[in-house]
């Protein structure tokens, strides 16, 4: 049955990151399946960043002052008037809320209007507060709101088992109320390409073997661990080069670390690149890396890993849940203790030196991505939960 879905999130969808990709893929997928969606976002960006979401999707903007200190407050004040009007006007079959921790309004309105509500949780309150560096009393307020939202939502979706287990431990929510739906990959955009052609497309030299990373440059991505492993890799494979695609908080610190080790000629920072170019970069890499540094509790569910696999590239991954175990199960690379630079370097060298094995390994990852990690599959799982919550309320 085709449904009217009100999707509420607090993201600037004019850019590119994992959160925006997740929102876009789920919304556009539901749209393709015939559902009508109203996507309610803060008025910060004008477009979806070039990622088409379908003719069944209508953007609803909440005007917001674009300054960090007053942005949430302005969103809250205006949403007090806008959201009730939206609920009444649209009369949705269900409301899908993507984890807004600083308000209870979307879930509260779903209760008052008897509208089934699905709450997506992508992180823990204390880790959000740690990243934002807010006061203890702010954490207490946010955690109180989060607890209320969890208890009053009709169903909860998380992206990792670790988040689910923390919700069960902290808040006493029934396990039956929580489903895990991992991230996915768009198989129409991410697929194997000729490596030489991909290198030419992104302007990389044909003579080097590239070890690459794509994503936000944040402390938990452990790129300092890759830098620590680089000297040992280069000692044994002088043609190795390291490519970092993306931007974030760690750019300056990583470049400083590289300079101290005199590795400036061996690392390439591209900054943020247009999304359509990302598959070309991945396909130009001989090896892709996805690390996790334990500066937060939950490693998360890296979309980049599924994109690496879909492109048929061998992967070196940290031996943590959602990373190394996925690579190991798919036989798509090597799981390592990325905190050990020698072990990490040896894993990279093993795949660099045996290119035939690397290609076979990459193909196994590709077939696993085709079978289990498509966004289409994740949309169907989400769709089933939405339908169950609506049916239960009837």
Image (tube, rainbow, N blue to C red):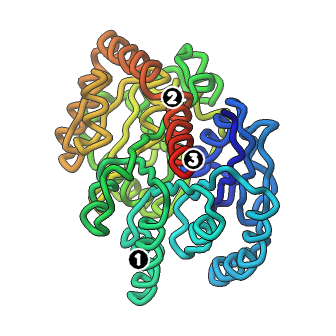
Which tag is nearer the camera, tag 1 or tag 3? 3
Residue pointed to by mark 3:
390
Which mark identifies residue 377? 2
> In the image, 113: left or right of 208?
right
- Give the residue pinned by disc 1: 143
Tell me residue 157's x, y (percent): 45, 50
Element assignment for label 3: helix
Q: Which of marks 3 and 2 is nearer the N terminus?
A: 2
Left or right: 204, with 32 as reference point? left
The quadrant of the picture occupied by the N terminus is top right
**Residue at (21% x, 38% y) in the render:** 336
In front: label 3 or label 2: 3
Q: Where is residue 52 drawn, in percent x and y?
A: 75, 38
CA gap, disc 2 to disc 1?
32 Å
User: Which badge, 1 or 3, comes first in the chain's sequence?
Assistant: 1
Q: In this view, does 325 lie above or below 162?
A: above
């Amino acid at each position: 049955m085709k449904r009217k879905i009100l999707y509420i999130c607090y993201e600037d969808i004019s850019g590119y990151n994992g959160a925006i990709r997740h929102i876009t893929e789920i919304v556009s997928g539901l749209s393709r399946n015939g559902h009508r969606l109203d996507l309610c976002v803060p008025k910060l960006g004008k477009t979806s960043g070039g990622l088409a979401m379908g003719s069944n999707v209508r953007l609803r903007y909440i005007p917001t002052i674009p300054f960090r200190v007053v942005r949430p407050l302005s969103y809250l004040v205006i949403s007090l008037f806008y959201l009730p009007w939206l609920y009444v006007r649209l009369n949705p079959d269900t409301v899908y809320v993507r984890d807004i921790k600083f308000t209870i309004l979307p879930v509260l309105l779903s209760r008052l209007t008897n509208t089934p509500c699905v709450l997506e949780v992508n992180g823990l309150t204390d880790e959000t507060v740690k990243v934002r560096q807010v006061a203890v009393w702010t954490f207490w307020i946010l955690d109180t709101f989060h607890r209320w939202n969890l208890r009053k939502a009709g169903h909860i979706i998380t992206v990792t088992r670790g988040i689910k287990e923390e919700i069960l431990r902290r808040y006493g929510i029934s396990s039956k109320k929580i489903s895990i739906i991992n991230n996915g990959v768009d198989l129409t955009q991410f697929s194997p390409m000729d490596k030489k052609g991909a290198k030419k497309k992104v302007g990389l030299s044909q003579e080097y073997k590239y070890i690459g990373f794509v994503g936000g440059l944040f402390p938990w991505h452990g790129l300092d661990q890759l830098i620590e492993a680089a000297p040992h890799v280069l000692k044994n494979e002088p043609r190795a080069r390291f490519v970092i695609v993306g931007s974030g908080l760690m750019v300056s610190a990583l470049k400083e670390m590289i300079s101290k080790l005199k590795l400036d000629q061996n690392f390439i920072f591209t900054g943020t690149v247009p999304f359509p170019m990302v598959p070309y970069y991945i396909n130009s890499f001989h090896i892709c890396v996805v690390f996790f540094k334990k500066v937060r509790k939950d490693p998360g569910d890296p979309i980049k890993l599924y994109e690496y696999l879909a492109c048929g590239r061998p992967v070196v991954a940290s031996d943590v849940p959602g990373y190394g175990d996925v690579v190991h199960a798919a036989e798509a690379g090597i799981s390592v203790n990325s905190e050990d630079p020698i072990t990490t370097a040896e894993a990279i060298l093993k795949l660099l030196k045996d290119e035939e094995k690397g290609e076979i390994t990459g193909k196994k990852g590709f077939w696993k991505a085709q079978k289990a990690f498509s966004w289409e599959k994740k949309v169907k799982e989400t769709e089933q939960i939405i339908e169950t919550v609506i049916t239960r309320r009837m």
